Image: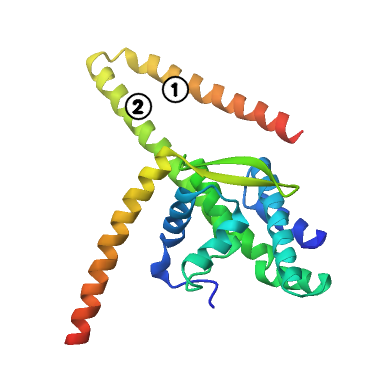
């Protein structure tokens, strides 16, 4: 895969929202895969140039491969989102039960939830700054 | 040979990947080749399916990835975990159930 195509592949993965370490690994695995295909084609009697072209055609366009990653990533994200919603629903239900018995706890729960959300946001912001600085 | 299968192929790549990795650890290229080989060229799973699937299975804990040297090149080998082995068992049972049901239905239709 020529460097222009690799750049397109990398760009497609990044725009799909994949984390940088996953993008790096996907690119290196694809390069290895293509090298194996080239070796196989040369062993079958093709010239290096023909083998490179054959490997490129077998792998497909960078966008096609990236779309598989994007689909898989979206599915994983959606599953994680459902899990978050389910756990939040559970926490709220639990809080509701507790508050029904002791109404003064509503404020305490509100403060705890807001603090948790702020801490998570601050942590994610710091992580993003470190990784993408 | 078609690169993309019909809709009922959903789940088959995962089953094949887990089955092959239960026999020995492999890297992506080896897996793509092995799938073609063990299915007698009936099923060819492209790179755009295999690698995202491997990464997803690793994330879910069914596989473990490890960088290893092989013939002077560093490869990412995928190993089946205990969780993956359980998943393979479940998928194999499911496949047996579905395929026998479909075979019965097709058999019935041909006699109608």
Badge 2 and badge 1 both on one subunit: yes
Quarter of the figure with the C terminus of chain B: bottom left
Q: Position of residue B60 (x, y in %)?
A: 47, 42
Whether residue B31 is situated above or below residue A24 in the rendered picture:
below
Residue drawn 50% across the image and 19% down it: A115
User: Is disc 2 in contact with disc 1, using a CB cutoff of under 8 Å?
Assistant: yes
At mark 2, the secondary structure is helix
Q: Mark 2 or mark 1, which has the lower sequence index?
A: 2
Q: Quadrant of residue B66?
A: top right
**Residue at figure coordinates x 34%, y 53% from the top left:** B91
Q: Quadrant of residue A119?
A: top right
Quarter occupied by the N terminus of chain B: bottom right
- The front one of A87 and B44 is B44
What's the residue at 53%, 56% (across, down)?
A: A71
How busy is the neighbourhood of tag 2: few (under 14 within 10 Å), some, or many (20 plus)? few
Residue A48 x, y percent position in the rendering: 82, 70
Q: Position of residue B86 (x, y in %)?
A: 36, 43
The residue beneath circle 2 is: A91
Residue of label 1:
A113
As rendered, which of A98 and A53 lies closer to the eye?
A53
Which one is in front, A58 or A8? Answer: A58
Circle 1 crowding by C-alpha within 10 Å: few under 14, some 14–19, many from 20: some
Task: Label 1: state its secondary structure.
Answer: helix
To which chain does the residue with label 2 belong?
Answer: A
x 22%, y 15%: residue: A101
């Amino acid at each position: 895969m020529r460097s222009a195509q690799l750049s397109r592949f990398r760009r497609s993965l990044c725009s799909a929202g994949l984390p940088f370490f996953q993008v790096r690994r996907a690119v290196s695995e694809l390069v290895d895969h293509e090298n194996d295909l080239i070796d196989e084609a040369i062993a079958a009697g093709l010239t290096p140039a023909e083998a490179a072209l054959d490997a490129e055609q077998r792998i497909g366009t960078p966008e096609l491969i990236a779309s598989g990653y994007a689909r898989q990533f979206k599915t994983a994200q959606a599953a994680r989102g459902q899990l978050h919603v389910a756990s939040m629903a559970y926490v709220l239900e639990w809080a509701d039960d507790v508050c029904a018995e002791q109404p003064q706890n509503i404020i305490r729960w509100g403060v705890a939830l807001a603090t948790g959300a702020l801490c998570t946001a601050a942590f994610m912001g710091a992580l993003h700054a470190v990784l993408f600085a | 040979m078609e690169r993309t299968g019909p809709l009922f192929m959903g789940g088959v790549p995962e089953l094949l990947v887990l089955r092959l990795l239960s026999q020995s650890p492999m890297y992506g290229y080896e897996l793509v080749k092995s799938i073609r080989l063990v299915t007698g060229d009936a099923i060819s799973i492209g790179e755009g399916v295999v690698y995202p699937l491997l990464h997803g299975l690793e994330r879910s804990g069914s596989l473990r990835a490890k960088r290893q040297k092989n013939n002077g090149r560093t490869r990412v080998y995928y190993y089946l975990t205990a969780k993956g082995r359980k998943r393979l068992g479940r998928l194999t049972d499911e496949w047996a159930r579905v395929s026998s049901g479909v075979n019965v239905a097709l058999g019935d239709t041909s006699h109608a």
